[in-house]
Image (cartoon, rainbow, N blue to C red):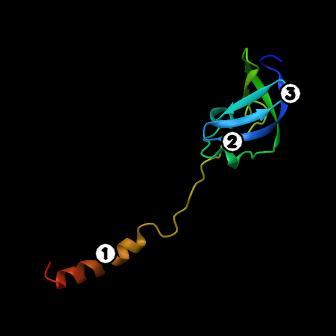
Amino acid sequence: MKAGDVVEGKITGIKPYGAFVKIDDQYDGLIHISEISEGYVKNIEDHMKVGDEIKAKVLEVKDDSKVSLSYKAVNKTKKKKSEDVELKSGFKPFETMLPEWVKKYRNDGN
């Protein structure tokens, strides 16, 4: 196994910083949270769960058979595009209510 290889593995654990992957009897890997998706990842479990079979790209193999993996390099995920939002009410409720509020609070002596 070397950097650049694409491997299959099974998610064995998830922590806030990444997901642990069992590749085979010899190798265990970690997908750092920054290698899960192109976009922001708030919760890894929104992308994968323990027991999932995944494919990932090998970034580095360390002497102790620990492997750094990238999920996003093999499983391209699109960033969410921003959406144009059309305001249906806008400031109209404010404009409508302002004269009423002014009248109400002027009558209270303020």
Q: Please tell me which of labels 2 and 1 falls first in the chain.
A: 2
In this rendered view, identify the residue nearer to me: 3 or 81: 3
**Residue 85 image position (x, y, % from top left):** 56, 58
**Residue 55 image position (x, y, % from top left):** 82, 34
**Residue behind mark 2:** 14
In this rendered view, identify the residue nearer to me: 75 or 83: 75
Instruction: Look at the picture and state if 104 lies above or below 8.
Output: below
- Which element type, helix, strand or loop, lies under badge 1? helix
| Foreground tag (1 vs 3) | 3
Residue 5 visible (yes or no):
yes
**Residue behind mark 3:** 25
**Residue behind mark 1:** 98
Q: Amino acid at mark 1?
A: Leu
**Residue found farthest to the left:** 109
Instruction: Look at the picture and state if 14 lies above or below 31.
Output: below
Give the image quarter of residue 59: top right
Q: Amino acid at mark 2?
A: Ile
Residue 78 visible (yes or no):
no
Residue drawn at (75%, 28%), measured in percent from left and top?
A: 29
**Residue 39 image position (x, y, % from top left):** 63, 40
